[in-house]
Amino acid sequence: MPTHPRGDNDSKAVFTPPPKRARSSNPTSETQCIHLFNAADLDRDGLLDSKDLTRIGKALETDSVAFDWPKILSQGTHSRLVSRTEFVNHLLKIWEGHVNEKTKTFNLAFSKKITKAIGCVRSVTAKQLMALIFDALDMNADGRLSRDEFFRAADALGEHIESDWEQIHRAFGSDPSRLVTKEQCIHHWTNQIKNSGALKGERFEAKYEQFLMSSLSKLKCIEFVNLAERLFDAIDRDHDGLVSKREALRASDALGFHGESGEQRWSDMLHALGKNDPEDYKIEITKQEYVGWILKHFHDQHKIRGNQGSIEYRTYIMDALERLKTLKARELCSEFFRVLDTNNDGFIEKEEVLLCHSVFSPHPKEGERLWSLMANKDDSRISKEQYVGYWMREVEGEIGANDYFHHNYARFIQSRLAKLKGKVSSMERGPLRHLVLFNLSGADEALRTNIITRFVALRSLVRGMDEFEKGIITNLHHSEPGHLSHAFLATFSGKKARDAYLPHPEHDKFVSMVSKVLDKATTVFDYVPTTLTVKANKEKDGGGGGGGGDGDDDDDDDDE
């Protein structure tokens, strides 16, 4: 075969690199939307809630980018959560005017705005991350952690936190058996992290932030077990720890199974649990069995459809739980009791019943009548059974054949419940005024001086009585059943401080002593102060009488 002569220039091989591929400087519009979603999805559950969407909205607002997140929620499959597909499709639709048809990318100026927003959303402060940890622990979403909820952190964080629970209550002077708020937890965690050196400015150092992110994912796994347990508790209407066929069929509508499909679901569950009996109405299922069955379905969905399947199944359980909790009459009445029972001892007192009544009616005498119907003659408190039993009889006409409240009445009750939660929360935070009106006109000067001196001395009994005032009533327009002569006003930091003060032995001694010299004209009540802003009327003669009158009265009281 002929050979080609090798010249001098051929002695060295010359490598010529292939031409570089032309690459787009911008990612596609869909990719950028996905990056924005991932930046906001801090707990990595594949869903965004209203808080996540609010953070995106604030980041985009600085560059005047349209982002109507309430509309995203309303158009989603679920009313509270948005999946990645729903999020991306919505953004591509409202931002289609910024997309280049050929390259499927956003135009350069708009792409820079989105990239900037992604950076802002991804930059999470330490406080925001701690709030996410708290929310993941707060399984019943009441804004407070019980001891059990708090100790769930140990499973995810791998820490012994017995001392943390005690330290939080010590720092805030509260009872270790009580719940802790988000503010208390974040305050305590912040102080701990500052001492460890993991906090740099407003953010955690990178390694510690990654650790907390992974802990969030662990908490989500624990969360689903808790969701399944809560679902069981919602279905277990008589709270005996067992679910019967009757209870399961009553809950089947909320779970999306109607008529015969509800019967079939019950049969399938019994078959899977190995409880085959022709008389299936006699069979009952324990919580452990039910939760195990739900978890099996959860893992099956994950195997079949991956992460999206497990996300949708979790959301399905949440929706079912909400429907059960929202519409069940007995559960709603029980929720009122739970909110009022702030010390978790299973009883509420008269003043708590009156507080509950105040969100329905402004007339205290009606509240007194309700208390007399709920409690026995000599009772100072009532149990959950007494309270819920009374209301179930009282509102029987508003309950349908399926034991749910009628829709409109359920919405009314929910609004009252929300108002009650706000009132109780305000009392917990404070300030709380404790007003005492006495008639000491029948006592001589020495006795009056002794009573006043001992009353003022009570201020040192407990932490949290921030202010104490006393005065002589000089202008009494009306009083029942008799004359009142002296007023005492104590301001507590909150309900906890007031509750520690009232049963104190020294307070009891004072009450015993003073009751011997007082007539029946004695008034004691508490209230949460509300600041009202009254706009001054510039007209000389008309319209401003109400505001001006209030101001004059206040000045007169100060002078007295």
Image: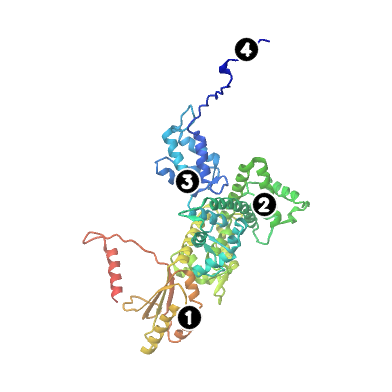
Q: Which mark is residue 260?
A: none
Instruction: Please indicate whether residue 105 sits to the left or right of residue 223 in the image.
Output: left
Q: Residue furthest left?
A: 540
Q: Secondary structure at mark 2?
A: helix
User: What residue lies at 37% left-to-right and 89% top-to-bottom?
Assistant: 446
Cα gap from disc 2 to disc 4, whole angstroms: 91 Å
Tell which of 221 and 432 is nearer to you: 221
Q: Nearer the viewer, mark 4 or mark 1?
A: 4
Question: Which residue is identified by label 1?
Answer: 507
Q: Nearer the viewer, residue 405 or 401?
A: 405
Q: Are marks 3 and 1 in contact (CB under 8 Å)?
A: no
Q: Tell whether label 2 touches label 1 (CB within 8 Å).
A: no
Marked residue nearer the N-terminal end (1 or 2): 2
**Image quadrant containing the C terminus:** bottom left
Q: Nearer the viewer, mark 2 or mark 4?
A: 4
Q: Quadrant of residue 175?
A: bottom right
Q: Which image quarter: residue 526?
A: bottom left
The residue closer to the viewer here, 236 or 145, is 145
Q: CA distance from mark 1 to mark 2?
A: 54 Å
Q: Measure the C-alpha gap from mark 4 to mark 1.
A: 116 Å
Q: Which residue is mark 3?
A: 121
The amino acid sitting under disc 3 is: Val
Provide the secondary structure element on which disc 4 rests: loop
- Indicate the position of residue 388 as horizontal and vertical percent values: 58, 64
Q: Tell me the kind of residue under disc 1.
A: His
Calculate the distance from the C-alpha at mark 3 to the C-alpha at mark 1.
54 Å
Residue type (three-letter) at the residue carrying disc 2: Leu
- Among the two numbered marks 3 and 1 on one chain, the one whose residue lies closer to the N terminus: 3
**Cβ atoms under marks 3 and 4 closer than 8 Å:** no
Q: Is residue 444 visible?
A: no
